[in-house]
Amino acid sequence: MATLALQLVGLALSILGWLGSILACALPMWKVTAFIGSNIIVAQVFWEGLWMNCVYESTGQMQCKVYDSLLDLPADLQTTRALVVVSIAMSFLALLIAISGARCTRFVEDPNTKAKVLRIAGVVFILAGMALLFPVSWSARNIVSNFYNPLIPEALKRELVSQDQPAILLHIQFLEMMFRCLGRSSSYGTFK
């Protein structure tokens, strides 16, 4: 019974990680205007995301503009887009694999095969987490290096917005699946 509860918690965490990845991909909050210098009163806040830029004005209005051309985007943004979309697809695939190998389903009957399916799902989850963590780390590195670059004007400096929670959830899901499979090898069977 405890194994079933752990599997359900693992599936819930994987769904949260997958939904968080989708949110991180869709929201235009990867970079936000930095409030530095002596002027702390600002009329506009600029948000930059993977798919669009937005301007939030002090009057409460927000205007967003989707990027016009894929070829006009910098290479790091194109790579980040691709890796985030790949991470979302891999997370969904791993979720389907994990559901098929869960104890509460009957897709696979043999306990040994279920253990192998769950291990495969765990590996796909860790790959999906790495595919999301890499572009987030790369983006964070670029933002921090541009922030401390004295050649960039203060008006163009951006701050970080936290986008790493989905990747952390996917890594937690992987670890949970691996510990569950390794710790309960007698109830699942072993590799041959």
Image (cartoon, grey):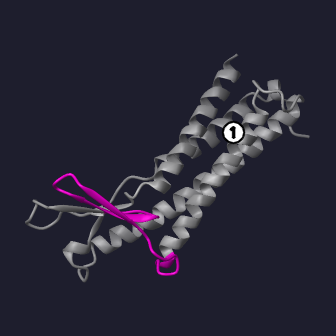
Q: Can you say whether 121 is above or below 2 in the image?
A: below
Residue situated in front as seen by the camera: 185 or 97: 97
Of the 4 image quadrants, the one containing the C terminus is top right
Expressed as whole percent of the image width and height from the top left, the position of residue 93 reads 71, 48
Q: Decide: few, some or many residues near mark 1? Use Cα within 10 Å; few <14, some 14-19, many ≥20.
A: some
Magenta stretch holds residue 56: yes
Magenta residue span: 47-75
What amino acid type should be assigned to the residue bearing mark 1? Met
The image quadrant that residue 63 belongs to is: bottom left
The reply, left or right, for residue 189 in relation to residue 146 is: right
Expressed as whole percent of the image width and height from the top left, the position of residue 76 reads 49, 74
Expressed as whole percent of the image width and height from the top left, the position of residue 166 reads 51, 47
Residue furthest bottom in the image: 151
Magenta stretch holds residue 162: no
The reply, left or right, for residue 40 in relation to residue 158 is: left
The reply, left or right, for residue 44 in relation to residue 126 is: left
Mark 1 element type:
helix
Q: Which residue is mark 1?
A: 178
Of the 4 image quadrants, the one containing the N terminus is top right
Which residue is drawn at the image coordinates 82% and 28% (left, top)? 188
Residue situated in front as seen by the camera: 134 or 153: 153
Which residue is drawn at the image coordinates 59% and 32% (left, top)? 12
Residue furthest left in the image: 38
**Count of numbered labels shown in the rendering:** 1
Residue situated in front as seen by the camera: 182 or 157: 157
Which residue is drawn at the image coordinates 70% and 23% (left, top)? 3
Q: Can you say whether 187 is above or below 90 in the image?
A: above
Expressed as whole percent of the image width and height from the top left, the position of residue 30 reads 39, 60
